[in-house]
Amino acid sequence: MRAFAHLSATELRLLGRDPGSLFFMVAFPLMLLFLNSGSKTPGNFIPGYLAMILAIGGMAALPGIVATYRERKVLRRLATTPMSPLALLAAQVAAQLVMGLGGAILVVGVGMAALGVQAPDNPAALALAFFMSSLMTCSIGFVIAAVAPRARVADLLGLLVMFPMIFLSGAAVPRSGLPDTVRALGEYLPLTQGVTALAESWSGTPTVLPLLILTGIITICTAIAATLFRWE
Amino acid sequence: MTAISVRELRKSYGGTPAVDGVSFDIRQGETVGIIGHNGAGKTTTVECLVGLRKPDSGTVEVLGLDPATRRRELARRIGVQLQDSALPDRIKAGEAMRLFASFYPRSANWRRLFETWGLDGLRNKAFGDLSGGQKQRLLLALALVGRPELVVLDELTTGLDPLARRETWELIGALKTAGTTILLVSHFMDEAEALSDRVAVFKGGRVAAFGTPDELKRAAGASSLEGVL
């Protein structure tokens, strides 16, 4: 356990040293919030931004990191130590979760302190929705890492999956403003379930359906990734 | 005491045999070099020894354990440096060392290891910013941080300049004196000759010859190990 904690802390530090992850997971959501500060209810944007932070980390950053570890034989090297290479993948999830939490606390904190945003109605449900959304985005990231032949392809695929997802799911911009056909498309995106779960617990009544769908997506994507993943 | 025992090891990739009936024994405390051209089966054999690959047939025993079924138990007692393996660019040398030290139940004093390997000034330097020789030395030091009984080194000094190679040889000599069993895979005949008690010559997935460098040269009528190949 000590070794796994050490591994996760190291992965978190490496993630924090990546300017792209740092900007898009921490500074970018804050920037968007300020751009919407003229709105009467800037708080309505926050659940979406939380989902966006997790999507950027899990779907766009994680695949490239994992594929690079495979390409540079980091996974193979780890398999010759008492630490399992599977632990390195689990450490990625831990690092994404903590990094995402950092970005989330900042955007919520600044919103409450500077823009008069109300505290979430149901913090426990929000935490659960955040955790499940993080696992979901990482599981999709692992599928991308599994199918991508090279690290550069993994990076590209990650962006191709993440960008439409954050714009059509209501994460980066509210879905209410989207044209009808495009909005209908959003119904079928995994991240939409994350946004719904986060929004319901942020203000309103949390329901169990989005969490069940998230569980299903996590299970299916993890199974696909486990089947297709190559260690070398 | 036998450190490594291999009997009739076979491993094919897609029908093409990479290792085709390899057998040899290595005694505890011995330094053995494996030499051979590309595709001779050296790396596949090593990968079977450290548990990275499962043999198609044959038996492998390393420190009394079957690597295919008891990889993690074995991993605590061996140190491995893999050919072309690297670390993430942004990890600092000191971080990598502390991290790897945390994997082992009785790890070495990594600060001392840093001094020994001339890495002291590089503790806060990112892996991506190290020179080829510095990277190699760090990867070697990482292979030793768990105080291994057996060290497996695949292409030990590839990418090092002549001076760095000599320095590495000296450090391997010290390791040898301390009683560590060393398995050394090399392209460089002079290296295998300088460091090894015995040398195994791999050809076409088999052990073509196995003996002390002098025995091999005498048998082949060659003046250097280069001639043996």
Image: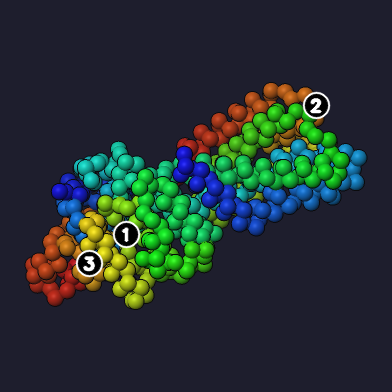
Name the subunit of mark 1. B
First in sequence: mark 1 or mark 3?
1
Q: Where residue A87 sits: x, y (%)?
A: 47, 42
Name the subunit of mark 2. A
Circle 3 packing at 10 Å, graded few (<14), some (14-19), many (20+), is many
Q: Is residue B20 toward the left or the right of residue A117 in the image?
A: left
- Seen at 34% across and 41% down, the residue is B72
Which residue matches tag 1?
Answer: B154
Name the subunit of mark 3. B
Which amino acid type corresponds to the residue marked 3 in the rendered image?
A: Leu
Q: Is residue B128 visible?
A: no
Determine which of the numbered discs, if any, sits on residue A204 in the image: 2
Figure colour scheme:
rainbow
Which amino acid type corresponds to the residue marked 2 in the rendered image?
A: Gly
Circle count? 3
Q: Where residue B6 sits: x, y (%)?
A: 19, 47
SS assignment at label 3: helix
Separation of residues labelled 1 and 3 (CA atoms): 14 Å
- Seen at 24% across and 56% down, the residue is B180
Same chain for the residues at labels 3 and 2, yes or no? no
Q: Where residue B124 sits: x, y (%)?
A: 52, 63
SS assignment at label 2: loop
